[in-house]
């Protein structure tokens, strides 16, 4: 890989130089309180930031949060993230209340060596996500003016052709940060020669979002275990009734076709937990997949399925897991996700957890993060990597 790394930049010496770091600090916020509910993505960028601080750089961090529409929107402010980042770094982080305006300019100009600043949400500016090269380029020019060098440590955003990810590295000397490097190293193990058996577990709600990765993985994997909301479209494709469960009608034919081509590699649930409603206190029971009542909806995989999936996982030497098995945020429907996560930690395998939701599930369920081989900070990014797509943020670093 012809990518320069943070160590190359550090070797040149960064003391007194302004280093612009693109991070993915897109953390989940509590809907009621606005508090950060999982700070995993902030922690993940600490090794890169810590090294730059130590080396005396003036560190200018930028990130997106959520999907504001190109204009300032207070609910998506990075201000709470600046506070948390300061706590974790053990030194206050200066926060600019705009991204490339007066506040940003003076914050960057006032930085002392070894100090860190965070700019306000990149997506408060239409240029960040614009499809128009000139509009993106103009915004990239403004951002690039804040750095003498650029570090990409935003693995979760490398699949986006956005100004801060794709256009800024064309304007500054650029390197990959520690997180991006580690993510790419780990994921490339899965695409080059995974030790076998290679077992993939996919969950989440929509087949349509996972279709490309299923297509790409089927020839490579030994087993593909499917749970989560998307299993119901597969069950329907097998001719079963799924009640009022999540169903993508226009994907049923596609799923039938996948099952036919899968050479028996795809494993589907044999039992599921069905409820009267999508609610934490809804009445619920475990039923066989051929006995889902017409008025109930499936919200988790059942215990027999967990046992079957766990048996497959116990044989594995390489595991990739993306997407919860059920509505783990509700205690009544968390057993499937917990069971699979525990089975993965017990397997004598190299395991990778991909995706914001599955990574958050690991932490929300109180599981030991260190018992997984790697927990990716990228959801869409890790899937697109496994699909073999060119990731704009990585391609930009290669140039
Ligand atoms: C993510 O959460 O997947 C990344 O931060 C990218 O966010 P996006 O899907 O809004 O581009
Ligand atoms: Mg996303």
Image (cartoon, helix red, strand yellow):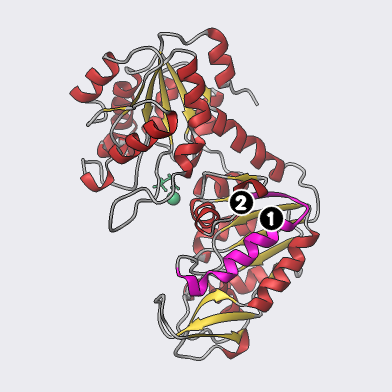
Q: Nearer the viewer, residue 398 or 359?
A: 359
Mark 1–mark 2 CB contact (< 8 Å): yes
User: Considering only order in the chain, which callout, 2 or 1, is on the residue closer to the N terminus?
Assistant: 1
Q: Which residue lies at the image location 56% right of the left edge and 46% below the top edge?
A: 382
Q: Does residue 241 appear left or right of residue 110 in this picture?
A: right
Q: Does residue 224 appear left or right of residue 64 in this picture?
A: right
Q: Does residue 42 appear left or right of residue 176 in this picture?
A: left
In the rendered image, the vertical position of residue 205 relative to residue 173, given as above or below: below
- Measuring from the top left, give residue 336's x and y in whole percent: 59, 70
Q: Which residue lies at the image location 26% right of the left edge and 20% below the top edge?
A: 107
Q: Which residue is mark 1?
A: 345
**Label 1: which secondary element:** helix
Q: How many marks?
A: 2
Majority secondary structure in the magenta region: helix
Quadrant (top left/top right/bottom left/bottom right) for the C terminus: top right
Q: Is mark 1 within 8 Å of ligand 1?
A: no
Q: Which residue lies at the image location 72% right of the left edge and 72% below the top edge?
A: 308
Residue 30 lies in quadrant: bottom left
- Measuring from the top left, give residue 174's x and y in whole percent: 49, 20
Circle 2 crowding by C-alpha within 10 Å: few under 14, some 14–19, many from 20: few
**What segment carries the magenta color?**
330-353
């Amino acid at each position: 890989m012809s990518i320069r790394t943070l160590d190359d930049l550090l070797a040149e010496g960064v003391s007194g130089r302004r280093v612009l770091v693109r991070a993915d600090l897109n953390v989940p916020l509590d809907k009621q309180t606005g508090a950060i509910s999982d700070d995993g993505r902030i922690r993940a960028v600490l090794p890169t930031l810590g090294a730059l601080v130590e080396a005396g750089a003036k560190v200018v961090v930028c990130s997106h949060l959520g999907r504001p529409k190109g204009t300032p929107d207070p609910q998506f402010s990075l201000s709470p993230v600046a506070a948390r980042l300061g706590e974790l770094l053990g030194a206050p982080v200066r926060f600019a209340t705009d991204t490339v305006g007066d506040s940003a300019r003076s914050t960057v100009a006032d930085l002392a060596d070894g100090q860190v600043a965070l700019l306000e949400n990149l997506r408060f500016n239409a240029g960040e996500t614009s499809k128009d090269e000139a509009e993106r380029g103009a915004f990239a020019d403004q951002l690039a003016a804040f750095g003498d060098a650029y570090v990409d440590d935003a693995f979760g955003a490398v699949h986006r052709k956005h100004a801060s990810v794709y256009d800024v590295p064309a304007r500054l000397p650029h390197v990959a940060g520690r997180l991006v490097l580690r993510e790419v190293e780990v994921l490339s193990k899965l695409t080059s020669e995974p030790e076998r058996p290679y077992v993939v577990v996919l969950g989440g709600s929509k087949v349509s979002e996972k279709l490309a990765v299923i297509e790409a993985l089927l020839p490579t994997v030994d087993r593909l275990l499917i749970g989560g909301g998307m299993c119901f479209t597969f069950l329907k494709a097998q001719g079963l009734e799924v009640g009022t469960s999540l169903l993508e009608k226009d994907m049923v034919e596609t799923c039938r076709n996948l099952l036919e081509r899968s050479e028996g590699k795809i494993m589907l649930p044999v039992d599921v937990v069905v409820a009267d409603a999508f609610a934490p206190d809804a009445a619920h029971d475990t039923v066989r997949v051929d006995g889902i009542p017409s008025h109930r909806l499936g919200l988790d995989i059942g215990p027999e399925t967990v046992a079957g999936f766990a048996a497959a996982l116990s044989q594995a030497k390489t595991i990739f897991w993306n997407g919860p098995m059920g509505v783990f945020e509700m205690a009544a429907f968390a057993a499937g996700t917990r069971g699979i996560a525990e089975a993965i930690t017990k397997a004598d395998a190299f395991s990778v957890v991909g995706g914001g939701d599955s990574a958050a599930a690991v932490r929300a369920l109180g599981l030991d993060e260190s018992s997984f081989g790697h927990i990716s900070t990228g959801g869409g990014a890790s899937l697109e990597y496994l699909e073999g797509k060119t990731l704009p943020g990585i391609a930009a670093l290669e140039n």
